[in-house]
Structure formats: structure tokens, C-alpha cells
Amino acid sequence: MRAAATLLLLAGTAAFAAARREEPTSVRDDWPRALALARARDVPIVVDAWAPW
Amino acid sequence: MRAYVLPDARLARLAGRFVWLDIDTEKPANAPFLRAFPIDSYPTLLVVDPRREAAVLRWTGTATAEQIERLALDGEREMRAASSPGLGGAARGPDAALARGDRLAAERRPADAAAAYREALAGAGASWRERDRTAESLVQVLAGAGDDAACAAAAGKVLPQVLAAGRRARLAAQGLACALGIGDAAARDAALRVLEPPARAAAGAREVLADDRSWLWSELSEAREALGDARGALADARRWLAFLDGEAARARTPAARAALDGQRLDAAIRAGTPDRMLAPLLLSERELPGDFVPAQNLARLYLELGRPAEALAAARRALENAEGPRRVRIRVLEADALDALGRRAEARAALEDAVRFAGELPEGVRPARWSSEARARLERAPGG
């Protein structure tokens, strides 16, 4: 039982990690956070700069 | 981009390759970003290299999800090339010129970028994959450089070769906008006559983004006016308004509908029926408490309708929620209302505040038109 629960937990964690990998990382109005995330992953930042009309 | 790009399925292919950052330029918290990356027009898409904190690609205006995917990948390639110039083989020919143009545009050197884009187009064959994108980038940067004549001429030249209807719509709209800015009337009219037929064709084409179709009708109406055809201008304004009314009726949320309010108000004023926007704007203000835009639009409408007391109240409601660059425009509206009410000293104080506030903004978001408008009105105002 405990082994099954551990397996389920591991499977869940793996699925969660996979899902996280698939989701584009989106940050709103927080340049320092976007910069830190992009540096940690060594990926570019795509910025949408807009104004309400 | 927020509304229709991030949810797009094609971005799943890019998962993990980018961080997507959404920047509302009206929020004071974004001032540090805007000091580092000035924004000249809206919307602007930037691809930023986080290690150098440098923009490697800048795109102004709308784009489809597919086009944004391509731009993001171009930016990524440029970032990798900058960090490892000896790896992967340098791009040659038109691809190298395009990459150079993108880099220069990202650095806000539009005249130099235009030269690079022209070089790319001149050196490429008819089947070059990036031809349409480069043509659009060229017209964008010429507009950004304020070279209206060159922008209109370039748009007229590239339009017949551009295949995608969406790009043709943006090129035609930008070309018309530039042509309308040409100071010499004969040169302006000649440019308008070249650009109007493809613009009119694009306005009726499918696969054109709603914002771009709206932009086209707006420019077409102004073009008819500039060419002395008041009836034609009115007819186009009515087409513009009918299109926007249809879009508003289809909007799924109050925010999506309200996002059309400013354009609908412009179209209604141009069509000579501003009063029809009173109910929709009041509804937007009721449904979006805390949003300054509906009250700003109402202030403009009330001034248009000759109701300055209500315009003043609306402007002051807008000021309660506006924290960013738009305060300059709203202060000018407030001054207009006060002036119409004969409260000249208060009008002057509102203009002084607009000028002071504009001076404190990062250069990258300072509203050039309304800052100089506030200064000019202040110089003309009594009591100075």
C-alpha cells in the first residue's frame, strides 16, 4: 500500500513536472521576476508592452 | 498578445523556450522596465536577451499567433548568435541583413534598420521566405523614424508583392497613415492615390485582424477627407462604425467590448453621431469599476456634446484611477472642460500639472503628442 502510494506520488510529481515543462511561463507586470526566471533557464523573454484603450 | 496569443495551441511547441512578460505601460511599477526599454508605439513586442538585458528584436503593431511565434524564434536565434558568434555558422546574404535590421530596430535606430531591411530585400529572390516580414519591418521602422514620405513610398512599392492579406492590411494602413502626415499637399495626395486602392481591397478581405480592419477604415476615411471628398469620408466613417458595432455585439466579456470603446467613439465622432456612444460608455463605466478608460472616453464625449460640467466630473473620475502616462491626456481633457466652464485659473493649474507629470515620466512612455499639446495650451492660456 505504502509502495503504491509512493509510486502514485512519484507518478503525480512526474506528471506535474511534465505539465510544467509544457506550459509557457507567463509573468505579468514583474520585470525582475521575468528576468530571474529567464536567466535561470537561459531563455529569451518575449515582452508584450501595451496600454489600455 | 495576452488575449489571443498565449492561449494559442501553437505556443505549446515553444514551451520552455521563452518567458512571456506582459507589461501594462500605465502601471508605475513598470517604470524601471520602461526606462530600460522605451516603447514608442502600442502594442510593441520585444524579445529580450536576459544575460545582456538587451532587446534583440522589436515589433510594433499587431501580429497573428503564427507571426509572433516566428518573431520569437528569430529573436531566440539572434540571442544565441550574439552569445556564441563562432557557433552555428553566420547567416549570410538577406538573412544576415534582416538579422542586422532587427538588431538595429531593437536598439531604436530606425533609419539604420531601414537601410539593412532594404539591403535584405534587394539581395533576396522573389521566393525568399522572409520577404513579407522584412517588407513590413521596413515600413514599420520608416514610420518610427518619422519619415512619412519614405514610409508611404515603401508601402506603395512593397504592397503588390506581399501575399498575406493580414500583412497587406497593416502595410496599407501604415502607408496611408504616413501619407496623411506628408506636409506637401500634392505629394500627400499622390501617395494617398497610390495606397487607397490596395487599402480598400484589404479592408474587405478575410483573414484581417479586427484591430487592423478598424485601423484601415479610420485611415481610409481620413484619406477621403484629405482628398476633399467629404461624402466619401462620411461613408467610410459609417462603414468603420458599423464594423466596430458588430465587433462589440460579438464581444464575449464587458472588458472585450469596452476595449473597442475608444475606436467606436472616434468612428462615431467622425460619422457625426457621437451621442450614440453615451449609453455604451456609461455601461462600460458601470461594468468596469476601477478602470479609468471608460471615464476618460466619457469626458471626451461630453466635451464633444457641449456638456462641460459632466465632462469635468468624468475626467476627475478617470484621474482617481489613472496612475500612468494617460494622466497627461486626462488632465488636458479636464483643462478643456474647466476652460469651457470659464474657470480659467483651474484650467491653467490642470495644464501645469499635466506638464509637470509628463516631465517626471520615463522618456520611453512620455506621451509626446499630449505633452506638447499641454505645453502649447499652457503658453496660450491667460495668467502665465
Image (cartoon, helix red, strand yellow):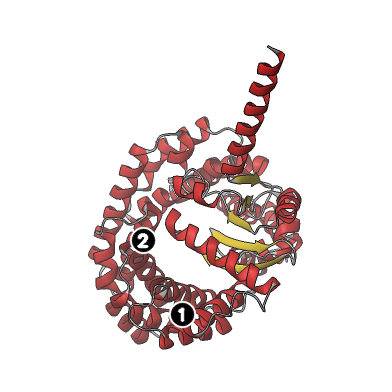
Give the image quarter of residue B173.
bottom left
From the viewer's perspective, tell me whether residue B154 is left or right of residue B90.
Answer: left
Give the image quarter of residue B187.
bottom left
What label does residue B245 carry, if any?
Answer: none
Q: Give the labeled residue for mark 1.
A: B148
- For the residues labelled 1 and 2, the Cα–Cα distance comes to 18 Å
Q: Residue at x 48, y 87 (%)?
A: B119
As shown in the figure, which amino acid type bears the numbered disc 1?
Asp
| Crowding at mark 2 (Cα within 10 Å: few <14, some 14-19, many 20+) | many
From the viewer's perspective, tell me whether residue B214 is left or right of residue B233.
Answer: right
- Residue A21: horizontal and vertical position, in percent? 61, 43
| Label 1 in the same subunit as label 2 | yes
Residue B366 in view, yes or no: no
Query: Is B135 in front, or is B200?
Result: B135
Q: Which SS class for mark 2?
A: helix
From the viewer's perspective, tell me whether residue B61 is left or right of residue A23.
Answer: left
Q: Residue at x 60, y 62 (%)?
A: B46
Q: Residue at x 39, y 42 (%)?
A: B277
Label 1 marks a residue whose chain is: B
As shown in the figure, which amino acid type bears the numbered disc 2?
Ser
Q: Residue at x 38, y 48 (%)?
A: B274
What label does residue B218 carry, if any?
Answer: 2
- Residue B311: horizontal and vertical position, in percent? 54, 44
Residue B276 in view, yes or no: yes
Label 2 marks a residue whose chain is: B
Query: Is B319 in front, or is B308?
Result: B319
Query: Is B318 in front, or is B290?
Result: B290
Q: Which SS class for mark 1?
A: helix
- Residue B92: horizontal and vertical position, in percent? 52, 84
Answer above or below: position of A45 versus B199. above
Report the label total.
2
